[in-house]
Amino acid sequence: MKLGFIILCRYNSSRLPGKILREINGKPILKYIFESLSQVVSPENIIVATSEEETDNPIVEYCKKNKINVFRGSLENVAERFLECAKHFNLDYATRINGDNLFIDLNTIKSMLEIARKNTFDLVSNVKNRTFPKGMSVEMVKVNYYNEIYKKFNKPEHFEHVTIYLYQNDAEQNFYYFFNQTCIEAAGIQMAIDDQHDFETASKIIAKFDREHFTYSLKEVFEIYKNVNEQSI
């Protein structure tokens, strides 16, 4: 079974243009994400999926320069881009990671990978009920299943948000929902990098790291997050 990670991103973000390549402590956000995922899967099974628009050329150029797999698809139809990327790289399971998710909890991903590798569930997700911080979402979907369910998408939001249809129609589906039980107080906090304020917060958190960023657990990152926010008050 081939399981890969698809990092969905675009360069021309309205709230924080070029954020995927913005540097924190001398390193682009994309590199943080790639380094984290490389701890759990082979780098060849990590793909950056961006659009065919010229505005996303900097992402493609960065990936080629750094030998990162890259796929180009529709700008607006993100679900199609995700699916076509998974099929192009012959993935059996495709894991969706957003390009603003700098703080990836590897313990969570490792646990979810164990579940996915049993090949029992069509979706393994930690998004349900938002027990994890925003920015630590992980969704592992069986590609054959997604290829069929995609045919039922019939609203703009289904194509923009990739998995929203699955949650709206999850009754009697073969899904596994993974819930946060190690740091419950972190549920729903903003850890995704959506705007300049989020970027500054992430920069302050990274500045306090004294070892490799991917070795920090959810609980450790949350404690630093609290400390950073208390200092900002």
Image (spheres, rainbow, N blue to C red):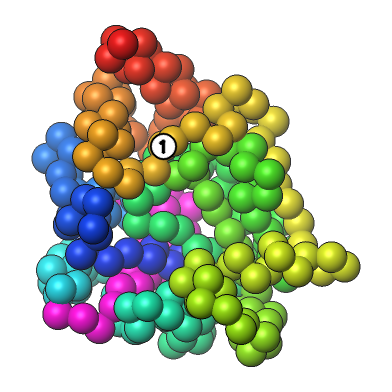
Q: Residue at x 68, y 44 (%)?
A: 129
The residue lying furthest to the right in this view is 172
Which quadrant would residue 191 be assigned to in this image?
top left
Looking at the rendering, the stretch of residues picked out in magenta corresponds to 35-54
Which quadrant would residue 60 be assigned to in this image?
bottom left
| Location of residue 9 in the rendering, given as x and y in whole percent from the top left corner | 32, 64
| Location of residue 90 in the rendering, given as x and y in whole percent from the top left corner | 51, 84
Q: Is residue 92 above or below residue 192?
A: below
Q: Residue at x 14, y 80 (%)?
A: 54
**Within-10-Å neighbours for mark 1: few <14, some 14–19, many 20+:** many
Q: Is residue 150 above or below residue 36?
A: below
Magenta-colored stretch includes residue 2 = no
Horizontal arrangement in the rendering, residue 92 relative to residue 232 (left or right): right
Nearer to me, 68 or 156: 156
> What residue would you read off at disc 1?
191
Q: Is residue 224 visible?
A: no
Q: Residue at x 78, y 65 (%)?
A: 170
Magenta-colored stretch includes residue 47 = yes
Q: Is residue 64 above or below residue 196?
A: below
Q: Secondary structure at mark 1?
A: loop
Which quadrant would residue 187 be assigned to in this image?
top right
Quarter of the picture containing the C terminus is: top left
| Location of residue 121 in the rendering, given as x and y in whole percent from the top left corner | 76, 66
